[in-house]
Image (cartoon, helix red, strand yellow):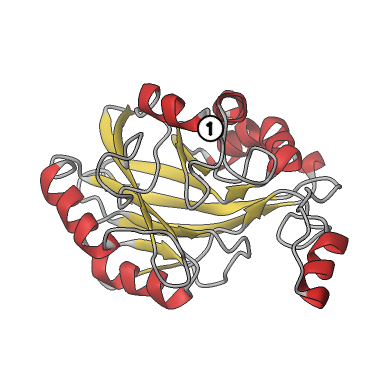
Amino acid sequence: MEKSIRILCIGDVVGRPGRDVCSAVLKKLRDSLRAEVVIVNGENSSGGLGIDPESAQEIRDAGADVITLGDHTYQRKEAKDFLDRNQEWCIRPANYAAGAPGRGWTIIKKCGEDIAVFNLMGRVFINIPLDCPFLKADELLEKHLSSSKIRVCDMHAEATSEKIGMGRFLDGRVSLQVGTHTHVQTADEQILPQGSGYITDLGMTGSPEGVIGMDADVALKRFRTGMPHAYKIAAGKGVICGVCCEVDAVTGKAVAIQRVRVTEYSQF
């Protein structure tokens, strides 16, 4: 292997605790892992629901090259214009309906290589009108991303089966597929038979003291009573979760993948 690219992907940033841990740790983590590319899911970064220009810029300043999103993409009214203006580094799921603000893919240049990043959203248990993510993946790979050897997909989905299905569908056609949305890091990081790195869910970047980043008392009221209660962000020091994948720059195949979970900042 003459040249490789190391790609660090970070799971859903939840509110202020998630943004704070990114600001405190991400650049140091990038250096320690020798990662040339950092991709961060930021769809819960603004108050736990959606993204706004300020939270997006904070994540970018912390060290993200590309921010991906999900089902809360348009939760904040400011997001629509922001995504249209900044689609080179902040992307939303590509299988939103045609005409949705923003774009679902980007190509950045790192270490002399074109790195394609695209974002998809699953449809199982997701109550949003969406195009088929499998057909959209085919379209993107054939139409927009065919010239890039190194390709990364963020599959934002509720059902593990749908994420695994997409992993099998894209095996050999992407360098890395990561799952987001469920906020719980899975222990199935692997290189699939045709050479794609894979993990079902990156996990969450935020406070572990609540329920998937949100205040535990409020979450329990919702579960116990069946009544709506406004969510609020869990307090506490954040953790940062994700994977780091090494990719052969010539073949575009993954050669190594490791889970990442940082709870103690002092290690840096």
Residue at left offset 63%, top offset 65%:
184
**Apparent side of residue 114 relative to residue 254 in the rendered image (left or right):** left
Name the residue that disc number 1 marks. Answer: 77
- Give x and y (percent) for residue 104: 32, 42
Q: Quadrant of the C terminus?
A: top right
Residue at left offset 24%, top offset 50%:
252
Q: Secondary structure at mark 1?
A: loop
| Quarter location, residue 100 | top left
Q: Nearer the viewer, residue 63 or 179?
A: 179
Q: Nearer the viewer, residue 152 or 30?
A: 152
Q: Residues within 10 Å of mark 1 (few under 14, many from 20)?
A: few
168 lies above or below 12:
below
Q: Nearer the viewer, residue 248 or 132?
A: 132
- Give x and y (percent) for residue 205: 66, 49
152 lies above or below 35:
below
Q: Is residue 171 visible?
A: no
Type of the residue with mark 1 = Lys
**Apparent side of residue 200 relative to residue 104 in the rendered image (left or right):** right
Q: Is residue 232 visible?
A: yes
Q: Nearer the viewer, residue 12 or 65?
A: 12
231 lies above or below 6:
below
Residue that sits furthest to the front in the current view: 227
- Give x and y (percent) for residue 155: 40, 58
| Quarter location, residue 260 | bottom right
- Give x and y (percent) for residue 137: 23, 56
Q: How many marks?
A: 1
Residue at left offset 32%, top offset 30%:
108
| Quarter location, residue 170 | bottom left
**Apparent side of residue 23 relative to residue 177 in the rendered image (left or right):** right
Residue at left offset 39%, top offset 67%:
123
